[in-house]
Amino acid sequence: MVMATITVNDEVKQELKKIGRKGESYSDIVNRLLIYYCTKKPDAELNDILENEEFTPLDLEAI
């Protein structure tokens, strides 16, 4: 596996430590956050569409 170095400020580092679980590396924490973000973001976008968009009712009898 290729490793990369990323720079974060001290505040971000401290927040990552708070989020981290015992034995987790920073890579593990960031990976878990990315998985959460990637699964929740579509839900949030869909909810926004459902709450803020207008829809034309579907006439099921016409199908």
Image: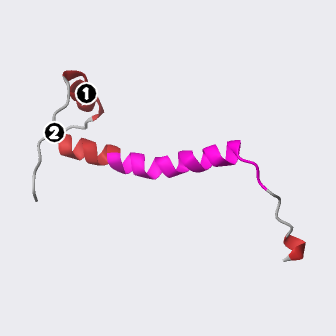
Cα gap from disc 2 to disc 1, whole angstroms: 12 Å
The answer to whether 28 is drawn above or below residue 63 in the figure is: above
Q: Provide the residue span drawn in magenta.
A: 34-55
Compared with 61, 55 (above or below) is above
Q: Amino acid at mark 1?
A: Val
Q: Which residue is mark 1?
A: 12
Residue 16: horizontal and vertical position, in percent?
Answer: 25, 32
* Residues tagged 2 and 1 counted as in contact (Cβ below 8 A): no
Q: Residue at x 10, y 51 (%)?
A: 3
| SS at badge 1 | helix
Task: Kindly report the secondary structure that dominates the magenta region of the rendered protein.
Answer: helix
Q: From the viewer's perspective, is residue 51 above or below residue 3?
A: above
- In the rendered view, does 35 fall on the left or right side of 15? right
Q: Is residue 54 magenta?
A: yes
Residue for badge 2:
6
Residue at horizontal 54 percent and vertical 49 percent from the top? 43
Where is residue 48, by image quadrant?
top right
Q: Position of residue 54 (x, y in %)?
A: 76, 49
Q: Is residue 13 magenta?
A: no
Q: Residue at x 10, y 56 (%)?
A: 2
Q: Amino acid at mark 2?
A: Ile
Counting the numbered discs, the total is: 2
Q: Quadrant of the C terminus?
A: bottom right
Looking at the image, residue 7 sits to the left or right of residue 12; the answer is left
